[in-house]
Image (cartoon, rainbow, N blue to C red):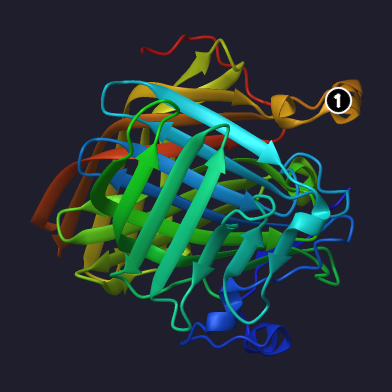
Amino acid sequence: MAPIPSVLASSPEQYRSLGLSPSTIEVWEDGLRTSPEQRGSWEWWYFDAHLSNGAKVVVVFFTKGLAKPNTGLDPRITIQLDTPDGRSWDVRHVFSPHEFTANKDRCDVRISAGEGKEPYIFRSDDQLRTYEIFAIVEGLEVRVHLTSSTEPWRPKTGYLVYGEKEKDYFAWLPSVPLGNVTATYRVPGEDPVTTKGHGYHDHNWGNISLTKVVNHWYWGRGTVGPYTFISASIDAERAYGDKKLNVFMLARDGSIVADDGTKVVFTASKIAFDAPTKRPVADLLRFEYRDGDVRYVLDYERQKTILRKDLIDTLPGIWKFLARLVRFDGRYLRFSGLLKLRKYEKEELVEEHESEALWELMWFGKVFEQVTQHPKE
């Protein structure tokens, strides 16, 4: 059977049909893009930050659970926090549909915290410049002020479209590839901590379950020297021909210098079997971008797996039971390690930078290659 077509929408006709510009990102693009009550549609607004005291924080507002999009509006918030003393939290809460509101004109997502209490918010100004984020989940409180220092970006239209008529899609908008952060977090029973750092925000939405179209992806973002980077390698499910899509953005001092994924060669090496998740994990990822005489090489070197999560554990009651019936076993892994960026001009090394980095591996589908070597920790 021939594979189902899948493509990153980028033709003039596709830009026009989506109402998008190849050169300008509008404020409404970060607003509500789906009808969250509609079964099959899904959407989330994501934020992460590396703070100057060594803490790391992730906050996500969802219209519904990632693993069960075929429901109506089922809003939730997740918070992940790693503190400088080595402690970690990974908490989530599901809210009632009537507690959720979102604006189509700009990013302004609100979830009620109860009568007389400040609502939880994920909202921007009217220029995609500054964002305010506030949430409390299981007593863990996070309040963030994010100011963008890099122009918003998307890979072409940001839409991966599927099928002959291209009606199914998965869309992605990195609204803030890099920003300055002032964050206050409070661990239950402790005093609040306020510190600064740098952060990232993106927005994802679609009308088809990722478990149907994506087998797995590697994704990472961060800074190294004067550069900001976003990189991803997305492998489609077998029905779509195991097609691989590379996404790559590199900005220097806030201005984009490379962002054409078709010019990227991705390689994953030193692959070994991770016993807890039953998934192959690469110790080395390389994104090599070549444009004429200029070549950038971005290397991730894994040093530690800092988070493992079974996606089925995010499902409640009957949904978890049904997921087990169909043998869904999606897994999420987060890594820490060393990142290296090298720039070559006419094969001469002209720049080299290193930094610490975090990146992820998301598995939605089955593993089709047998890996027996066990990875280092």
Residue 286: give x, y in percent of width and height. Answer: 35, 43
The answer to whether residue 370 is above or below residue 191 is above
Q: Is residue 236 above or below residue 168?
A: above
Mark 1: amino acid: Gly
The foreground one among 59 and 120 is 120
Q: Is residue 157 visible?
A: no
The one of 134 and 260 positioned closer to us in this rendering: 134
Residue 197 percent location from the top left of the image: 25, 51
Is 119 displayed left or right of 184 in the figure? right
Residue at the spot of label 1: 317
Q: Compare residues 118 and 227 and report the one nearer the observer.
A: 118
Quadrant position of the C terminus in the picture: top left
Residue 280 picture location, percent across and down: 54, 22
* Left or right of residue 153: residue 215: right
**Callout 1 environment at 10 Å: few (<14), some (14 to 19), or many (20+)?**
few
Residue 251 figure quarter: bottom left
Q: In this orientation, which residue lies closer to the viewer: 12 or 133?
A: 133
Tell me the residue at 50%/60% (across/down): 202
Query: Does residue 185 lie above or below 322 as drawn?
Result: below
Q: Residue at x 47, y 57 (%)?
A: 133
Task: Name the spot of residue 232 as percent of width and height, x first.
Answer: 48, 50
Q: Is residue 1 left or right of residue 199?
A: right
Q: How many marks?
A: 1
Q: Residue at x 37, y 41 (%)?
A: 185
**Lateral position of residue 218 relative to residue 146, left or right:** right
Question: Do we see residue 370 in this rendering?
Answer: yes
Name the residue: 14% across, 65% down. 345
Is 134 rendered above or below residue 185? below
